[in-house]
Structure formats: structure tokens, C-alpha cells
Image (tube, grey):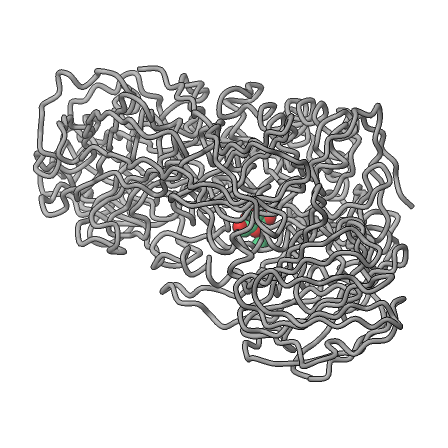
């Protein structure tokens, strides 16, 4: 029933549940049953979060992201590898710099994180073409089928990426534990089945020996392992069955939260019958390969990320992820754990630049409150380890109050019990109290013996019974376990519950132990008959107890409020209260070196598994005072130094016009003729017209220009255009150098229009005989993704059709001879890659790059530059000298608050040559653009170049821009290399 995989991983088996180093071992196995994965026979819960390195063009910060994930409770990271990010052209791939995924895997290994690899070939992920490379759009073969041409292309990609994954898989000493083939393939015809089989065969041929799975688009029972043999499911070439779900409830377009949803039972407690969940694949562990950790936001919304971060926030995490844990979904990936930036032309047509996602770790890599909650849930998972991963559904346990439902699981191997308590339905937010009766090996109990347990608001509780930890034995507790640590001075355990709730905890001893209340208030009583020591207390601050004797190692119990629990950091070797982040702890010869971040001058309280007499924080020695709790209190940490930012708006700006292609006599002799009759676009020109779409000519990303010549005729009174431009895309048109106008695709819905039709009237003189030139610029806001597997990514971009028309009657069959210009693939900029630029004149000339290209440009006040329709460029240079640490900056347009401006214009933002996004003033909602260090030179010169596009009306001038500090913490991941060459 289960496959076995040999591996040579050394560190892997332990990274999840503690950082004790182990000797390297020659080989490891990944196995599984219907409860969990096992690594070397040891059960593990895979508590994973999604992170997109391609959405963070600063590889040194990948380590920052992974350290923050680990510190907030994750033991695994799931990563898409979008094909187009790595493919410059057919047959041409690059894995250097921001595409150096070998480095990503190495960082994951060094940081002790398991990896789930998702190389597609299809990704989705709100990316242009769902991650398909531009050149694939020109393939006639239907994508994601077994058409040989498509399979050959997919194989080309897998041949590139698989060897990198293969050498980092757990079975070869790396940390990659699972491999996803395809993504959400909802077509299940024989052709699609053969395609899936082909992928699996290819991946195995490439030396991948870790378990394979796919990501079912919901719990449909698609692509379940063939051995499952469950009726109505679709078998696939998989080892594990996995699916995604986003059940959290929406935020409305106006930024207010929609109604609360109840958490669905997707596993052991599902009423779903044959299909789905564990029942669809009875021999494999519950596995959700994407479970909502936020959602994306769209052009023209009212700005949803703050709402999403709260709606899919701490309460949601406890209720929904708690329900998942109760349901046995023990391979669990939160999408997204870390927000990102869809820089350049990465974003799919719906989304704007920020892919913050309302994630726990925001786009700038700051920790939201919900990340602190994840730290507590992850701490629970780490502390319960094999017990939790070995649980099964157990007998129903009745709640004394029907407004509360209880899930009851138990581990048949070690006898431990898990009760997950929440409202019934779980969408309720009332305050309810309950008790329950439970029989364990320790006896039969009414829990709690005194009073009741509360669930207040959107919350859930994961409670343990008959649970052994360290050398202690927990009979039960109504407070939740956050972490436990063995120290030289005895054991330490941290429990929590919301402020002012009653708590009860029973521990088992051979004889009466001595109980000392060190801080706060708690009552204890010992029952000599059972050996039960019962503690009763009300959660307030931190209650500290020291329990000695009774046949066990001394135990320091810390019982905190939930809010105070969030201030603790733990990594299996230390427990630290205070600080903004704990990155690393190293104990060596009595010196404990801590690395982490702090945003203020504060003290730390520290417990450690190894004795120490000296303690450093980021290398600074601190003085220590012993406490009665077996910890030390440190002297104050140094506060971060203030960040001094230049006022870039007040700096020197230089100006250059940027739409020379509009001029009647512009020399387009080097442009390609657009006269193809073929093409793969799903939208076609009328019969007789040439194919104008940009892909047909090898221009896949960004802006594209057309020039068409025709002979004047009285019938040419209007020009009708159909163009494809993605969400919030636009076009501008000139006749003989005169601006006729522009058109923008409507926005404000999360399924925007991606192509449109528009008519412009032609001036009187255009009807005159003689040659006329139409110039058109199309701002291509990317290709559709292919979620439905219907080749939607092939919908054409650029011009689709153009016809001259008379006032009435049929369109004039006036031939137009077209030429086209974009940025041809493969791009010359191999550092920034194929998605950084389009075909603006300034992009081709390098106006966006750092260096001194602008020395001959006119100095201008940026908001008073000569107004002309089209695009103009503004450039400025500024120096930075940021304090070392975790310092994140953003670029803000206007006041940073107004959702949409009265001014109508859009800007491509280039920082040191990197296209860090698109600002559309009147569409919104994004006004602050995250600029990571690495793209920014934190200690030296920086160049900003703005390509501003408008109709030239002076009232549509650019708003002031300024830099802003998004976060300033002392500490950080270390120096971030700035490797942009000066040109
Ligand atoms: C699912 C995709 O697998 C993922 O790539 C991403 O698009 C995500 O959702 C949404 O952010 S799509 C599914 C919700 C239909």
C-alpha cells in the first residue's frame, strides 16, 4: 500500500520538531499510511506555507522569508516554479540570480525547512499565462493534453528543472519531500489522463523518487492514486491525493468583510460519501496542497488586503486550520504564507502588482498578527510531534452545550487524545461555555472538574489529554499547549488561553509534588489516589508555577494569555519572550548566541536547553539576571537607528518624451511586417485581415506598437479596433502624428474584460487621398491564465483587428499595411529576465536602466513636464544609507491613502532597472509599491525611472512620489547584496 523511497538526508528527520543536531545518516525513507507521512519511520506533520521566490527579486531575502516562516511555526515551504520565469525562449533556460533555484533549495536545507516542489508545467498562481512561457502561446497543440507537440514542450521544461529538484530531494540528502505534477487540471478525459501519466513517467525518468501528487481543484476526487479504487474518483499517476480549498469567506469589493463561513470537514468527519477527502484515497494521509491563507486583490477594487488579513486572520486560522487538523489533514499548505510582488509583467490580467494576499507575512516581509497565531499553532504541532501525526478519528465526545462541537481524535500507539472545540456551526461568534466527559488511560473525567471551558468569538481550541511530553504527563488541560522545552534547570512548558478565561490543568505524579506559585494566582490540589495534580486558575498575564518532586523532573509552567503567548519565540532549543523575531539560536561553550530582530529597546527573557553563562543578541553581549522561573532576564537591547530617507520628489528629475513612434515620419523600416495569416489566438480577425496579435511576431510581454499605412478615401471616416490588453489594459492611437485618443478596458470586477472594441472618428483631412499612418500603442496587461484548460492563455494581445468604416453601410475594405514592434524574445537583459520589459521605445533604448543615460535630458519639475499624449520618462537619482537590519521601504504615489486619483495616468516604475510594478492612478487600488533591498541599493546610489502614460491633458499630471519606511527593525538576515550593474 505504500511506496518506499531511499534517501540520504541527514538533517531532515529532525528539522520539524526541534533543532537537535543528529549525525549524518546514509539513507532515509519516506513512507506513509492513511495517518501521515513518515520520514525514516518517524511520523511527521507537514505544516507548510506557500512562498514565491519569483515574486521576490532579491535572493538574499529568500532566507529572510524562510527564517520568518520557520519562526512563525512552519516546517515546510511549498513553491511553484513558473515555467516562463525560467525560459527566455524555446530551448533557452536560465537559473541564475533571481532564478537561482538551486540556491533556494540550499537555503531551505540550511534553515531546516522541508520543501514541496510544484513545477507545473502549469501553475496558475495569478500569473500571466498561468506561468506558461510566451512562446508556448504560439503552439497549435492544445495545452495540458497529450498532444505530442505540447508534451515535447513540457518535457523540455521538466528536463531543465527536474535535475535541480532531483539533487535536492530528501532521498538524495536535500529537503524536498514531495513533487506536484500539473495544477488543478479539471479536465479528466483520456487525453488528459495520458498527459498526467506522461508527466509522471517523465518525472520518474528524470530521477525524482519522492512522492508525487497533483493539486485537485477542490475536493473532487481527481487524480487520486490508482491503488485507491474508490468509485467515482479519477485515478492518476500519483502517490498521494491532494486538493485545494479557499473556504474562508470573502471580502467585498468595497473592502468590507463578507459573511463569516463555517469551516468545512474535508477529511475524517466529512459527510461527503465516496468522493473526496480521505475517503477518496483511503490509503494516503489527508493532504491539502493549498488551503486559503488570504486571497488576491484585483484592479479597481477598493483595496482588500487589510480586510483579507483580518477576515482570513487569527480567528480563521484557529477555526479552519483547527478543523483541518481534526480532520486528519496533516500535510497542510497555507496559500500564501508570504505575500509577494508580481513585478514586471508577472501578474495575470486580474491582479495588480502587489500579491500581498493578506498573508501572515506581508509583501514587505513584515509579520502580521495572524503570523503570531500561526507561530502558536505551529508550536503546538511541533510540541505534539509524532503523537499528533499518528492520530485517528476516535469515539464521539458530547459537549455539555450544543452550541459547541467537539472533534475527538486519538493516537492508538501512544494513547494520546486531541479534542478540537469550536462553535457549532463554526461560523458563530458568540461566547459559549461547555464541559465534556472523556475516558483515557488515566481514568474517566469530566473536563473541567470545576467550571467550564469558554469559546469566545471566532476561535477554536486544540486540547490534549493523556499526553506525554518531555518526561511529564498531562492528564488534560483546558489551556492550549504552545511549546515545551527541556533545560538544565528542569522542563518548561508554555500554555495559553484568552485573557480572563478559567483554566484547568491536570498533571500526573507518583507522589505529591511541591507546587510553588511564582507569579499570578493558581490553586492546586493533589489526589493521592490517582496521582493527579489539579491546577485551577484564571488566565491573566503570565501565571508561573514551579512543580518539583513527585517522581518527575522539575517543571516550570508558564500559563499565559493568548496575547502574551504571541510574544514568545521558540525553536526547540530556546524559549524567548520579547523581541520582534527570533531567527537563530546557537549554544556553544556556555555562550548562547541569539540572532533576531527588535523594533524597540526592550529586554528578553530566555530559557535554553543548554546551560549558558553568556548571551549575545546579534553579537552584542547582554547582562543577565537569573529569575525564579529558570530563565534569565537580559539587559535592554539597543533600539534600531532611525532611517533617514531622501526626499526624492524634491530631487533633480530629468525628462524625455517617449512615444516617437506616433510621429508620421517615424522610421519604422526595421519593424516587422504584420502580415501573417495564421496564428493561435482564440480571438480571430475577420476573414481577409492579417493576424496582428503580438505573440505571432514573438512579442510576448508588455507594450507593443503598431504602424499601419493606408491610402486616404472618403469612406475612411472611422476606425474600429479590437484589441487584447488584459485587465486594466489600454491603447492609444494617432493618425499622421495627431492623437486621436485612447481607450481603457473597464475594471472593478474580479473577472475584468481582457479585450475590447473601440471606434475613433477620423478627421476630415484623413479622407483625402494620399498615404496616411495610423500609430497604435497597446499596453498589454498580460495574458489570461488557463485555469479551465481551454487554451485561454492564447487569447490574443495587441491589436486583434482594425477596419476603416464609413458613416453607414459596410466597412470599407481599405487595406492597411501593418508593421509591429515589441520587445523580441529572447531578451538581452539576462539578469532581470523575460518579464521585466515590453517594447516601449525607452525600454528598448534603456531609459529604465541605472547609469547616466539621462545627462543630456532636460531638467524638469516632474509635475510640470510638457504635457503630450503618450508616454514620457522621468528619471532621478538618490542615495541611500540605511541602518543595517530588517529595513523595508516602499514608494508611494500621492498621499498613499486615496484609492483612486482624479488624475488619469499610469506609470511603469523602474528602480535600478527593475520593473517594480504598474501604478494606475485612476483605477487603483495600489499606491504603495514595496521596493526590497537588493533591488534598492541600501548603501549607495539608486536610479528611479518612471514611464508615465496619459492622454497629455495637463490635469492628468503625475502626483508627488516619495519613499516610505514600511519597517525598521534592528537585526535582519544580514547584508543584502545589491548586484545590479550600473547600466
Ligand atoms: C488556485 C490555484 O491553484 C493557485 O495557483 C492560485 O491561483 C490560487 O488558487 C488562488 O490564489 S485556483 C482555485 C481557487 C480555483
Residue 655 at x, y percent in the picture: 14, 27
Between 574 and 698, the residue placed more toward the observer is: 574
x 72%, y 58%: residue: 547
The part of the image, by quadrant, that contains residue 694 is top left
All told, the count of numbered labels is 0
Between 508 and 242, the residue placed more toward the observer is: 508
Can residue 796 be seen in this snapshot? no
x 56%, y 75%: residue: 456
Residue 718 at x, y percent in the picture: 21, 46
In the drawing, does residue 142 fall left or right of residue 196? left
Q: Tell me if residue 328 comes above or below residue 574 in the rendering.
A: below
Q: Tell me if residue 932 comes above or below residue 24 in the rendering.
A: below
Q: Tell me if residue 959 comes above or below residue 260 in the rendering.
A: above
In the drawing, does residue 467 fall left or right of residue 65? right
In the drawing, does residue 837 fall left or right of residue 272? left
Between 764 and 408, the residue placed more toward the observer is: 408
Looking at the rendering, in which quadrant would you find the C terminus? top left
The part of the image, by quadrant, that contains residue 731 is top left
Residue 613 at x, y percent in the picture: 59, 33
Residue 541 at x, y percent in the picture: 52, 63
Between 523 and 304, the residue placed more toward the observer is: 523
Can residue 289 be seen in this snapshot? yes
x 12%, y 36%: residue: 868
The part of the image, by quadrant, that contains residue 395 is bottom right
In the drawing, does residue 542 fall left or right of residue 270? left
Residue with the most extreme bottom position? 401
Amino acid at each position: 500500500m505504500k511506496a518506499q523511497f531511499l534517501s540520504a538526508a541527514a538533517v531532515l528527520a529532525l528539522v520539524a520538531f526541534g533543532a537537535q543536531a543528529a549525525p549524518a545518516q546514509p539513507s532515509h525513507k519516506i513512507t506513509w499510511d492513511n495517518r501521515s507521512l513518515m520520514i525514516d519511520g518517524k511520523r511527521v506533520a507537514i505544516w507548510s506555507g506557500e512562498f514565491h521566490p519569483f515574486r521576490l527579486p532579491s535572493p538574499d531575502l529568500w532566507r529572510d522569508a524562510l527564517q520568518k516562516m520557520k519562526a512563525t511555526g512552519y516546517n515546510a515551504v511549498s513553491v511553484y516554479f513558473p515555467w516562463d520565469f525560467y525560459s527566455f525562449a524555446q530551448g533557452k533556460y536560465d537559473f541564475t540570480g533571481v532564478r537561482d533555484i538551486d540556491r533556494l533549495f540550499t537555503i531551505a536545507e540550511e534553515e531546516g525547512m522541508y520543501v514541496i516542489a510544484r513545477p507545473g508545467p502549469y501553475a496558475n498562481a495569478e500569473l500571466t499565462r498561468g506561468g506558461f512561457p510566451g512562446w508556448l502561446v504560439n503552439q497549435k497543440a492544445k495545452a495540458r493534453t497529450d498532444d505530442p507537440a505540447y508534451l515535447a514542450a513540457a518535457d523540455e521544461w521538466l528536463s531543465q528543472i527536474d535535475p535541480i529538484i532531483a539533487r535536492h530531494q530528501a532521498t538524495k540528502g536535500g529537503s524536498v519531500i514531495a513533487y506536484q505534477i500539473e495544477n488543478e487540471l479539471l479536465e479528466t478525459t483520456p487525453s488528459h489522463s495520458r498527459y498526467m501519466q506522461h508527466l509522471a513517467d517523465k518525472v520518474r525518468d528524470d530521477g525524482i523518487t519522492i512522492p508525487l501528487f497533483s493539486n485537485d481543484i477542490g475536493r473532487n476526487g481527481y487524480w487520486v492514486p490508482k491503488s485507491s479504487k474508490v468509485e467515482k474518483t479519477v485515478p492518476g499517476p500519483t502517490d498521494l491525493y491532494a486538493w485545494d480549498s479557499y473556504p474562508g469567506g470573502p471580502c467585498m469589493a468595497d473592502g468590507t468583510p463578507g459573511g463569516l463561513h463555517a469551516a468545512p470537514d474535508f477529511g475524517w468527519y466529512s459527510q461527503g460519501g465516496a468522493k473526496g477527502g480521505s475517503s477518496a484515497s483511503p490509503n494516503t494521509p489527508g493532504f491539502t496542497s493549498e488551503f486559503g491563507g488570504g486571497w488576491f486583490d484585483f484592479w479597481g477594487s477598493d483595496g482588500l488586503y487589510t480586510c483579507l488579513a483580518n477576515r482570513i486572520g487569527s480567528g480563521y486560522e484557529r477555526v479552519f486550520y483547527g478543523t483541518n487538523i481534526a480532520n486528519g489533514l496533516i500535510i497542510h499548505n497555507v496559500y500564501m504564507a508570504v505575500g509577494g510582488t508580481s513585478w514586471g509583467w508577472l501578474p495575470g490580467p486580474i491582479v495588480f502588482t502587489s500579491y500581498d494576499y493578506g498573508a501572515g507575512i506581508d509583501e514587505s516581509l513584515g509579520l502580521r498578527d495572524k503570523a503570531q497565531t500561526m507561530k502558536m499553532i505551529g508550536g503546538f504541532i511541533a510540541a505534539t510531534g509524532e503523537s499528533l501525526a499518528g492520530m485517528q478519528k476516535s469515539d464521539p465526545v458530547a459537549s455539555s452545550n450544543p452550541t459547541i462541537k467537539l472533534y475527538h481524535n486519538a493516537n492508538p500507539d501512544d494513547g494520546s487524545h486531541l479534542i478540537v472545540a469550536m462553535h457549532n456551526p463554526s461560523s458563530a461568534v458568540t461566547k459559549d461555555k461547555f464541559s465534556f466527559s472523556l475516558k483515557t488511560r488515566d481514568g474517566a473525567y469530566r473536563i473541567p472538574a470545576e467550571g467550564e471551558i469558554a469559546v469566545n468569538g471566532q476561535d477554536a481550541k486544540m486540547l490534549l489529554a493523556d499526553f506525554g511530553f518531555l518526561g511529564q504527563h498531562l492528564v488534560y488541560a483546558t489551556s492550549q499547549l504552545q511549546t515545551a522545552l527541556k533545560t538544565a534547570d528542569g522542563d518548561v512548558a508554555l500554555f495559553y488561553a484568552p485573557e480572563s478565561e478559567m483554566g484547568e490543568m491536570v498533571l500526573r505524579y507518583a507522589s505529591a509534588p511541591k507546587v510553588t506559585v511564582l507569579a499570578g494566582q493558581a490553586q492546586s490540589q493533589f489526589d493521592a489516589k490517582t496521582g493527579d495534580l489539579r491546577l485551577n486558575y484564571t488566565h491573566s498575564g503570565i501565571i508561573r508555577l514551579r512543580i518539583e518532586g513527585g517522581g518527575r523532573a522539575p517543571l516550570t509552567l508558564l500559563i499565559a494569555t493568548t496575547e502574551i503567548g504571541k510574544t514568545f519565540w521558540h525553536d526547540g532549543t530556546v524559549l524567548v519572550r520579547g523581541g520582534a523575531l527570533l531567527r537563530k539560536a546557537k549554544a556553544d561553550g556556555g555562550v548562547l548566541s541569539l540572532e533576531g530582530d527588535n523594533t524597540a529597546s526592550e529586554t528578553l527573557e530566555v530559557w535554553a536547553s543548554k546551560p549558558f553563562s553568556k548571551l549575545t543578541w546579534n553579537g552584542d553581549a547582554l547582562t543577565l539576571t537569573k529569575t525564579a522561573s529558570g530563565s534569565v532576564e537580559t539587559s535592554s537591547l539597543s533600539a534600531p537607528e532611525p532611517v533617514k530617507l531622501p526626499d526624492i520628489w524634491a530631487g533633480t528629475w530629468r525628462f524625455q518624451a517617449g512615444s516617437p513612434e506616433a510621429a508620421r515620419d517615424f522610421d519604422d523600416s526595421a519593424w516587422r511586417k504584420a502580415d501573417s495569416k495564421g496564428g493561435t489566438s482564440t480571438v480571430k480577425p475577420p476573414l481577409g485581415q492579417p493576424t496582428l496579435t503580438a505573440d505571432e511576431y514573438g512579442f510576448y510581454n508588455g507594450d507593443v506598437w503598431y504602424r499601419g499605412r493606408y491610402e486616404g478615401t472618403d469612406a475612411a471616416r472611422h476606425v474600429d479596433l479590437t484589441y487584447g490588453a488584459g485587465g486594466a489594459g489600454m491603447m492609444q492611437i494617432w493618425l499622421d502624428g495627431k492623437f486621436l485618443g485612447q481607450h481603457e478596458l473597464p475594471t472593478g470586477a474580479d473577472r475584468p474584460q481582457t479585450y475590447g472594441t473601440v471606434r475613433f472618428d477620423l478627421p476630415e483631412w484623413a479622407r483625402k487621398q494620399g498615404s496616411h499612418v495610423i500609430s497604435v500603442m497597446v499596453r498589454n496587461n498580460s495574458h489570461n491564465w488557463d485555469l479551465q484548460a481551454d487554451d485561454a492563455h492564447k487569447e490574443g494581445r495587441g491589436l486583434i483587428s482594425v477596419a476603416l468604416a464609413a458613416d453607414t453601410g459596410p466597412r470599407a475594405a481599405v487595406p492597411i499595411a501593418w508593421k509591429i514592434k515589441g520587445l523580441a524574445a529572447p531578451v538581452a537583459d539576462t539578469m532581470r529576465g523575460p518579464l521585466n520589459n515590453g517594447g516601449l521605445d525607452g525600454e528598448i533604448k534603456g531609459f529604465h536602466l541605472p547609469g547616466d543615460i539621462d545627462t543630456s535630458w532636460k531638467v524638469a519639475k516632474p509635475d510640470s513636464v510638457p504635457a503630450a499624449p503618450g508616454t514620457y520618462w522621468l528619471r532621478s537619482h538618490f542615495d541611500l544609507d540605511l541602518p543595517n537590519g530588517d529595513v523595508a521601504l516602499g514608494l508611494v504615489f500621492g498621499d498613499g491613502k486615496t484609492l483612486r486619483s482624479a488624475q488619469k495616468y499610469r506609470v511603469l516604475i523602474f528602480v535600478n532597472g527593475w520593473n517594480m510594478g504598474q501604478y494606475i492612478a485612476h483605477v487603483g487600488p495600489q499606491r504603495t509599491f514595496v521596493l526590497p533591498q537588493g533591488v534598492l541599493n541600501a548603501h549607495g546610489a539608486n536610479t528611479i525611472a518612471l514611464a508615465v502614460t496619459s492622454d497629455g491633458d495637463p490635469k492628468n499630471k503625475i502626483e508627488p512620489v516619495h519613499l516610505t519606511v514600511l519597517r525598521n527593525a534592528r537585526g535582519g538576515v544580514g547584508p543584502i547584496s545589491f548586484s545590479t550593474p550600473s547600466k
